[in-house]
Image (cartoon, grey):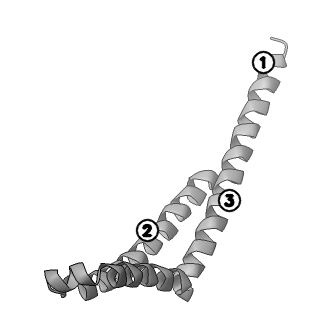
């Protein structure tokens, strides 16, 4: 497997883990909001929206989420670098081969 392919696989794995963590935070917030009666939900629409945004804010503050975001950014950067390095090597190889006298 190429280094670029491995890098992109790592990006996928990190983002998958991050998605699961964010899903858990969203489900916790949804469980809190779904238990409210319709009348209460209508009267407290502002509070419900505030709680939803607070849950999202808490997810972003979660050290595990922060770490996954950091790792995803690093893996994404590595994958891009490795991809461009491989493309550059392939272009150079083709140029070199086309310049060779037959």
Corner quadrant of residue 66: bottom right
Per the rendering, the mark at residue 77 is 3
| Direction from residue 70 to residue 101 in the image, left or right | right
Residue contact at pointers 3 and 2, CB within 8 angstroms: no
Q: Residue at x 49, y 67 (%)?
A: 15
Give the structural element (helix, strand or loop) at label 1: helix
| Marked residue nearer the N-terminal end (2 or 1) | 2
Mark 1–mark 3 distance (CA, rounded to whole Å) = 32 Å
Residue drawn where x is 71% and y is 44% of the image: 84
- In the rendering, at what x and y percent does residue 12 appear? 49, 62
Nearest the camera: 60 or 80?
60
Report which residue position mark 2 lands on: 16
N-term mark: 1 or 3: 3
Nearer to me, 38 or 68: 38
- Binning the other alpha carbons within 10 Å of mark 2 as few (below 14), some (14 to 19) or many (20 upward) gives some
Numbered disc 2: secondary structure:
helix
Badge 1 is on which residue?
98
Is 84 displayed left or right of 65 in the figure? right
For marks 3 and 2, the one nearer the N-term is 2
Q: Is residue 17 above or below residue 11?
A: below
Answer with the quarter of the image where residue 99 lies.
top right
Residue 78 picture location, percent across and down: 68, 59
């Amino acid at each position: 497997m190429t280094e670029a392919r491995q890098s992109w696989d790592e990006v996928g794995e990190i983002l998958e883990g991050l998605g699961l963590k964010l899903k858990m935070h969203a489900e916790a917030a949804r469980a809190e909001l779904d238990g409210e009666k319709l009348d209460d939900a209508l009267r407290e629409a502002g509070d419900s929206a505030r709680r939803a945004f607070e849950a999202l804010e808490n997810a972003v503050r979660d050290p595990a989420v922060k770490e996954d975001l950091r790792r995803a950014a690093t893996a994404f950067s590595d994958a891009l670098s490795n991809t461009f390095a491989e493309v550059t090597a392939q272009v150079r190889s083709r140029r070199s081969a086309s310049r060779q006298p037959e």
